[in-house]
Image: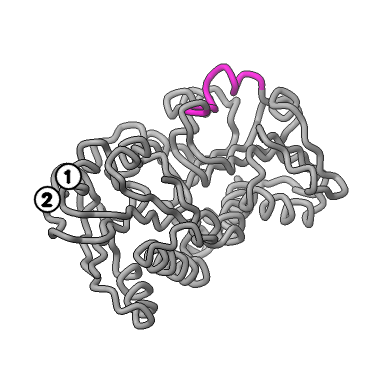
Amino acid sequence: MRVTFFSAKPYDKKFFSDLNTKYQFELDFFETHLGPHIVNAVKENTFCVCVFVNDKLTNEVITILASKGVKLIALRCAGFNNVDLESAKRNNIKVCRVPAYSPEAVAEHAVAMLLTLNRKTHKAYNRVREQNFSLDGLLGFNLHGKTIGVIGTGKIGKAFIKIMLGFGCRVLAYDKFPDANFTAPNFFYVDFEELLRESDVISLHCPLTPENHYMINEAVLSRMKPGIMIINTSRGGLINTDDMIRGLKSGKVAYFGLDVYEQEEKLFFRDLSATIIEDDRIQRLMSFPNVLVTGHQAFFTTEALTEIATVTLNSIALVSAGKADQVADGVMLA
């Protein structure tokens, strides 16, 4: 049974091929992202296409996949805003994802970005390599006692909250669907406005939906504390980049860490070191000394990649056996 991968990198090939010894699927790997330009490369009677965050599963693409006999779209990630679920249903194609491959991996990366921006360890590392041991410009602040705002309290958000509580922080959280069973000293669910007003640091841990697109915009930034730190390891479209740039220029935003970017499909997961990047927004962001950009690597741990491959292959096996109702860890979306 054939499974065709898009946006496949060497680590995808290694982890999926190693774990495929149990299933013996026929695996095809394409490095390019899936879109109208490449969809016809999918062979006839392919059972499943396995895709990642920057693949575009539009109605056009899904209709062509259906004509080739594809029965399943397997997302090897948690987000699914890049898939037209209604089109999948119309074309009788099932959709599954990996909702919680390693909450700790993403949460820990968010904390790493927070600490790096605060204590400027990236600047210190470069400075001492040039035998410059001056501390000028490296001043940070104690996290202990600060108020951390967390938007989204799914598994990743909860993992992040637990780490922040361990630092001795007060944690405020906002979620449309609060988890009444999640309680801890110094942790409080609050409304969105109170979180904006009280937080010293805000970290985003929610999926991208039509309702929260550009959740962080100029009006919202204006209601935050001056000198706010914002960390985004969720989806780039949660933040209006132009408004964020204005916030950085004005000094309203003192620190910004992003592992995701709304136009990342043209940049991330590629070596562009010998290329002129035409995206003026990302170039402007990287020009700020108080901005830290990583290339969608928060998920990138051995444990997470193992879990992604394990859950995805198991979901494919269950669906192919007519047991889609038994898919547990790999949540079925359509």
Above or below: residue 1 compared with residue 162: below
Give, as a three-letter code, the residue at label 1.
Ile
Above or below: residue 249 compared with residue 203: above
Above or below: residue 29 compared with residue 280: below
Of tags 2 and 1, which is closer to the observer? 1
Of the residues under marks 2 and 1, which one precedes in the sequence?
2
- Crowding at dot 1, Cα within 10 Å, few <14 / some 14-19 / many 20+, comes out as some
Image x and y of residue 39, in percent: 16, 49
Residue 214 covered by magenta stretch: yes
Is there CB contact under 8 Å for labels 2 and 1?
yes
Which of the numbered marks, if any, corresponds to residue 64?
1
- Asked if residue 225 can be seen in this view, the reply is no
- Crowding at dot 2, Cα within 10 Å, few <14 / some 14-19 / many 20+, comes out as some
Between residue 208 and residue 60, name the one nearer to us: 60
Image x and y of residue 165, in percent: 78, 52
Image x and y of residue 194, in percent: 75, 25
Residue 312 covered by magenta stretch: no
Circle 2 sits in a helix, a strand or a loop, which is it?
Answer: helix
Question: Which residue is label 2 attached to?
Answer: 40
Residue at 50 percent of width and 66 percent of height: 304
Residue at 78 percent of width and 36 percent of height: 189
Give, as a three-letter code, the residue at label 2.
Asn
Image x and y of residue 61, in percent: 21, 42
Q: CA distance from mark 2 to mark 1?
A: 7 Å
Query: Which residues fall within the magenta stretch?
Result: 212-223
- Asked if residue 123 lies left or right of residue 37, the reply is right
Q: Quadrant of residue 20?
A: bottom left
Quarter of the image that includes the C terminus: top left
Quarter of the image that includes the N terminus: bottom left
